[in-house]
Image (cartoon, rainbow, N blue to C red):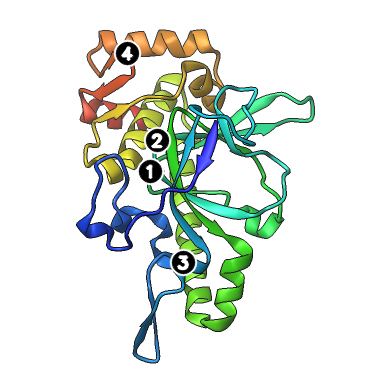
Amino acid sequence: MTLSSKTTKKNTSQHKHPRYVDCDNCSMQAICQPIDADNQAIDLTSNYLTRRVEVSTEQSSSLPLNQSAGVALFEQASPLTAIFAVCSGTFKLCQKNDDGLDRIVGFRFPGELIGEDALFLEVYNYSAVALGDNSVCEVYVDSLSACSQLAPELQQNLIQLLTKQSYEQQRNAHAITGKKSADCLLAAFLLNICQRNAKHSGNETEIELTISRQDIASFLGMRRETLSRLLSKFQHEQLISLNGKQLSLLSLNHLKQLSNQ
């Protein structure tokens, strides 16, 4: 396991890598760019930002191997040190209940933030676990706060970032809540994750599904057997195609109709 810094040139538009989300499509963009102050562009990002930090199982490090499988970017209840944006891959968010059992409370895809709610709590409210070899951009909170004292515009950009993130999370939650049946719930979930991943891939009908069926079932609040039966049903009805980890949505209209029932 390793968390090793791999910084890149700041002009990412000239050095794009298909593996990573484009900076223009990343939620962290508001605080990762030079700010305009007194008609001058001031770049303070080197003081608080590390780009494209790899989260990998290939080498040993101090990062823990989460019990629910995968490398933990951070653990629930640990003190806040940084907030993150996903550069590549998928993370699942695990939260322990009073009995010490993990439940899945969310997923994060390229361009989305992780750990931002800890800015209020000052501890992480869940564990963030990498599903495969992923990468993040890391913003150190104390350093960001110090820079914000020098440049109030940076503080304003952070508020804008958090407001937008809150809106996005409310919209994602609304997309899958209040569904009348398990069929509706699964259809809404598949549409939601493909739409969110499309900000990186550009394709809202296909996604590499690194999330296990057990984790999906936990998040949706259904038994794994029920999820497997529904996936088979959707394939039989030619709503989706699931070949290994490759998920394709074959009938967007039917899935949208089903998700709104």
Report, in whole angstroms, how far the alpha carbon at label 1 lies from the one at label 2.
Answer: 6 Å
Vertical arrangement, residue 10 with respect to residue 226, above or below: below
Q: What's the amino acid at mark 3?
A: Ser
Q: Look at 47% across and 80% down and name the residue there.
A: 153
Q: Look at 67% across and 44% down and name the residue there.
A: 125
**Which label sits in the foreground, 2 or 4?**
2
Q: Residue furthest bottom?
A: 38
Q: Are discs 1 and 2 less than 8 Å apart at CB? A: yes
Vertical arrangement, residue 78 with respect to residue 29, above or below: above
Location of mark 2 (residue): 89
Location of mark 1 (residue): 110
Report, in whole angstroms, how far the alpha carbon at label 4 lies from the one at label 1.
Answer: 21 Å
Q: Which label was assigned to residue 243?
A: none
Q: Position of residue 157 (x, y in %)?
A: 46, 71
Q: Are discs 3 and 2 less than 8 Å apart at CB? A: no
Return the residue nearer the eye: 132 or 163: 132
Location of mark 4 (residue): 244
Q: Are discs 4 and 1 less than 8 Å apart at CB? A: no
Secondary-structure class at tag 4 = loop
Report, in whole angstroms, how far the alpha carbon at label 2 lies from the one at label 4.
Answer: 17 Å
**Quadrant in the picture for the N terminus:** top right
Earlier in the chain: of badge 3 and badge 4, it is 3
Secondary-structure class at tag 3 = helix
The answer to whether residue 74 of the structure is visible from this angle is yes
Q: Is residue 32 left or right of residue 13?
A: right
